[in-house]
Amino acid sequence: MSELIKAVEAPVNPNIPALRPGDAVSVHVKIKEGNRERIQEFKGTVLFIRKSGNDQSFTVRRVASNGIGVERTFLTRSPRLEKVVVDRHNIVRRARMYFLRGRTGKSARLKQKF
Amino acid sequence: MLKGLIGKKIGMTQIFDEGGVAIPVTIIEAGPCYVTQVRTLEKDGYSAVQMGFQEVKPKRLAGGELGHLKRNNLPPLKYLREFRSKQPEVSEGDQVKVDVFSTGERVDVVGVSKGKGFQGGVKRYHFRGGPKTHGQSDRERGPGSRSSGTTPGRVYKGARGPGHMGDDRVTAQNLKVVLVDAERNLLGVRGAVPGGKGSLVVIKETRKQ
């Protein structure tokens, strides 16, 4: 791709490590409430990573109360992302973890990779 | 004051605004342009500014083109385009850079759309095509009837139908300027711009005010 385009694209956030599908992560998002800005945490499993570079995004799934699944997609280069912490890497054999969608509780567990 | 530039489309990407919202932008390498001629009402019958863009080797231009530029001691320029302007407020030999535009402004971008070749009526004019069932297997994307019956007994001139599509001069109006990089001569406008990557585009003040 053109170097000229790269020059205007958003810089890489150093607080976001390389993510893998299946990682248990907590995403710290800046949220504006009136004039105040606060940080909200979103904890869950990385379902998949879409594209790369400037347009990269990743989707995180978390099972909220009552077993209701919540999925949120974040743009990796977005300035609203404060940081992403990888809590644990899991052993997964596919790039897109769609099978987690039908599961909750025990069956939605993944084995940890050390 | 004249506001216009000639540039080259670089491509599209997305950038983030202050609120963190991703906006689609087309990056244009615009200018530096030179004012090669000022046309006046008295002399030429209309008022406009001729501008040139992209320096080339002198041997790439014909003698007459070189002579035209040499009057104002300008470098050899590949493209010359005119911009209508009642009060240009520029003089021949001036350099015009991207900083004539500022973010938040609205512009029109003129380009030549990508050529699509010979296309049918469905793609070219959004004809609906024929029925897909009830035994009509051979005219799913057909143009249907082109005209009436005995009166007028012919197809009107200019009737829409299959033919060559694209490769036309197209103006994208009222695009918002979201990025001005004077150092690299880059201009970013929100949304798409006609033409392929590397094609010539002309940026003007918008007509829609």
Image (spheres, grey):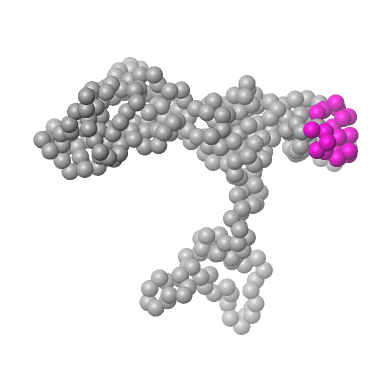
| Residue B65 is one of the magenta-drawn residues | yes
Determine whether B187 is above or below B158 in the image: above
Please state the horizontal and vertical placement of residue B11, each as a whole percent of the image. Answer: 56, 37
Q: Where is residue A111 in the image (x, y as percent from the top left)?
A: 17, 31
- B123 vs A50, left or right, is right
Residue in front for this viewpoint, B184 or B191: B184
Q: Which residue occupies the foreground of this view, B110 or B11?
A: B11
The answer to whether B190 is drawn above or below residue B93 in the figure is below
Which residue is nearer to you in this view: B129 or B60? Answer: B60
Tell me, yes or no, if residue A70 can be seen here: yes
Number of numbered discs visible in the structure rendering: 0
| Point 64% across, 41% down: residue | B199
Provide the residue span drawn in magenta: B57-75
Asked if one can make out residue B177 in the rendered structure from this viewpoint, the answer is: no
Quarter of the view holding residue B161: bottom right
**Can you name the residue that lies furthest to the bottom here?**
B150
User: Residue B154 at what x, y percent from top left?
Assistant: 65, 77
Q: Give coordinates of residue B90: x percent, y percent.
A: 77, 26
Q: Which residue is drawn at 59% across and 26% down?
A: B180
B60 displayed left or right of A39: right
Q: Quadrant of residue B162?
A: bottom right
Residue B190, relative to residue B99: is it above or below?
A: below
Q: Nearer the viewer, residue B44 or B8?
A: B8
Relative placement, left or right, of B123 versus B65 is left
> In percent of the image, x 78 and y 30: which residue is there?
B35
Quadrant showing the C terminus of chain A = top left
